[in-house]
Image (tube, rainbow, N blue to C red):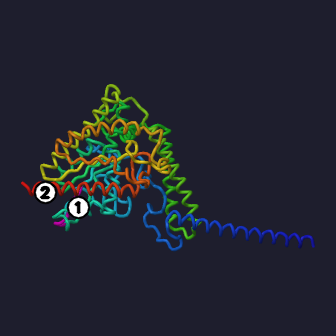
Amino acid sequence: MKDFKLLNKTQETLKVALINLALLLVFVEIGSLGWYFVKHKQFFYSREKAQDKSALGINLEGVRLNQSIVERFHPFFGFIQKPSADFRPGFKVNNYGFISPYDYPFKKFKKNQFVIGIFGGSVASDFSIFQIQNKILPQYLKQVPGLQDKEFVILSFATGGYKQPQQLLILNYFLALGQELDLVVNIDGFNEVALANLNNKNQINLAMPSIQHIQPLTSLANNSLSMEAMQATIRIKENKTRINEGLASLQNCSLAACDALTSVYVQNSVNNYRKDVIAFEKLRERKQQDEEESVIYINRNKSILEDSAAFEQMSWNWAKSSIFMHKVLSASNVPYFHVLQPNQYYQTKRVFGEAEKRIAFNSDTPYAKSVELGYPALLSKFANLQKNKINILNGVKVFDKTKEAVYVDSCCHYNKAGEVIFSNYVGSSILESLRKDRARNKKK
């Protein structure tokens, strides 16, 4: 009899536990449905399944899912991204390491094609991707008489970490290969001061490619990467595996709770990835071996330049490189536009919201001082650029009138809202300039 009562009590306890578990799962699912709606502005069960991993609601900024953490040496460009056919839908890292639908040099296969070359660093690379996807710049160019029926082909010659004179050298290299260009846009400024300043602090010639990118390649070539740096690369690889697996699971979740829990797991893996990247960046900058034994030669300075001298030299490198880009293009009547990109560390009248401040600013970044000192030096060269007939666009204030967040990190990159504002500024400025040129030519 006692066993029978114990059995009934156990069954009742189990029943209550199952009911509570079921209710918990229901509440978790309801809560997850609400969380998903707030995040994606659509209902989970009637959603359009994302085909692109970037549309899953995970902030993947700076995460190289299909690339190794270090670049590849290039004998002319300094470094490139590893060529890969699997980058994202519609794009690949092409035969020269640029993110593009095409291999280079690109040859026109239609008479009405109009080729736009985009030069610069990662902001320029993001800009070119955004134009291919959203066609904001082409929409402005179609308002120019004679261009309304053109098929615009946008080619990126930009890569994260590039700074002058890399843009100048890359332009001349591809022109030598016969690359046709009908218009060129060079978007830069940040790397020229931020990365060149890191060169200076490491006694590397300011005009050399970024030490931040070259140092790990040099260490690998010399077989001198530290054990700590190697361990960091292993953790980075492990986190990339977790992120890829988590993103694949997100694409196949049938319950909102699955989406919520997996999203938290993936975002945590992304955060760990970024921490390890920062650790790797610090480790790889350490001097690993006697430079006299290195198989890679890098021009060095005898001492660290004073800030005033360093930023003056950086700004002249920047200005002169742009002047020579203009000269070589003007010989073929190719319009050239140079854009000084906006950056959060150059103070304007923009008011940042508290949420954006947490994303856009980092008290430990080495870039803040570089921009604060370097951007005024760049701006001081505008008169010289204009004297040399450069179409120079000052984009530092383009975000001043928006209260919406536009930055996605504490470096320099923009979210979709920022890309739209920046694209409209570049597009409208180029349209206005081309119209003025056309009006002047009519008067002659």
Give the x, y percent position of residue 359: 47, 49
Residue under the point 55% across and 53% down: 268
Q: Horizontally, is 153 left or right of 303 in the view? A: left
Q: Is residue 402 visible?
A: yes
Badge 2 element: helix
Residue under the point 77% across and 70% down: 16
Q: Which residue is mark 2?
A: 439
Q: How crowded is the residue under tag 1: few (<14 C-alpha within 10 Å), some, or many (20+)? A: many
Please identify the residue farthest to the right as the structure is shown: 1
Q: Horizontally, is 317 left or right of 122 in the view? A: left
Residue type highlighted by circle 2: Ala
| Above or below, 343 relative to 39 | above
Numbered label attached to residue 141: 1
The part of the chain drawn in magenta is: 110-116
| Above or below, 315 relative to 420 | above
Where is the C terminus found, in terms of image quarters? bottom left
Q: How crowded is the residue under tag 2: few (<14 C-alpha within 10 Å), some, or many (20+)? A: few
